[in-house]
Amino acid sequence: MRLCSSLLCSLLLLGLSSGAAPALAGECRAQVRPLLLASNPAPEALQQVQSLCRAEADAGDAEATYQLAFFALGLGGNWQPEQAIPLLRSAADRGVTEAQYWLAWQSESGPELPHDPAIALGWYEKAAAGRHRLALQRLADAWERGELGLPVNARKALDYRVQIRRCEEELARKSE
C-alpha cells in the first residue's frame, strides 16, 4: 500500500488546513507529521512515535488519540480503519476539531461510515464551533445549496463565510 492512502492524505490535509489552533499533544503531533510526509518511514521510527502517541493518549491527551489513528489509516502500510474509527470518535468527543471534521466527512460521503447526513451535519457543526476552516466552508456551502437536510438560507451561508474570513484574518495576523 502506498504511504498516503486517500483517508490518510485527507487526515493530513485536515490537520494542515484547520483554521483552529491545534490542541497541544506533547511531542506526539510534532513527531507524527514528518512520518506522514516521508515516503518510506523507518519501522523503528514508526514504532517509537506510535509508542509515544499511545502513552500520551493513555494519559488523556485527546490530540494524541487523534494522531494515533494515523497508525491505523495507512501510516507505515497499516490499513485497519476498524481500529482507527474508535480513536477518531474518542478524540472528536473530546473536542479535536480535525477528528470531528473527519467523522462528518465520512458520515456524509466516505466509505468508512454509514451515509447519514444528519450525523454529518452534527459533526460539521461541532467542528465549525471550534473554528475548523473546512467545516465552516462545508456548512456555508450546505446552507447555500440546501444540502445535508438544510433549507437554502443565504443569510446563514453568509454568516459562515464571515467566520471563515475572520479565521483567515486572524491567521494572517499571527503569521506576520
Image: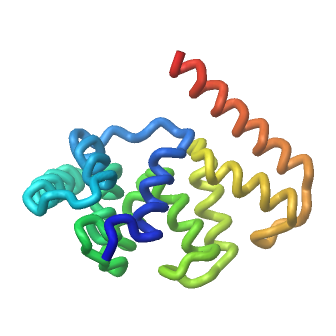
**Would you place residue 131 above or below residue 89 in this image?**
above
Q: Is residue 130 left or right of residue 160?
A: left
Query: Residue 110, located in which quarter of the rendered image?
Result: bottom right
Q: How many marks on residues?
A: 0
Pick out the residue farthest to the front: 39
Is residue 21 depicted above or below 98 in this figure?
A: above
Q: Residue 160 appears at what percent x and percent y?
A: 76, 45
Q: Residue at x 51, y 21 (%)?
A: 175
Q: Between residues 25 and 13, which one lies in front from this camera angle? A: 13
Q: Farthest residue in the left direction?
A: 44
Pinpoint residue 40: horizontal percent, then vertical percent: 22, 60
Quadrant in the picture for the N terminus: bottom left
Identify which residue is drawn at 62% across, 72% down: 119
Q: Residue 79: horizontal and vertical position, in percent?
A: 31, 77
| Residue 96 image offset from top left, x and y in percent | 44, 51
Quadrant location of residue 117?
bottom right
Q: Nearer the viewer, residue 60 or 167?
A: 167
Left or right: 50 with respect to 83? Answer: left
Residue at 61% x, 25% y is 170
For the view shown, which residue lies furthest in the top direction? 176
Residue at (77%, 52%) from the top-left corner? 140
Query: What colouring does the structure picture have?
Result: rainbow
Looking at the picture, does residue 22 appear above or below residue 144?
above
State the residue in front, 170 or 7: 7
Placement of 9 over or under 13, stated as above or below: below
Q: Is residue 83 left or right of residue 164?
A: left
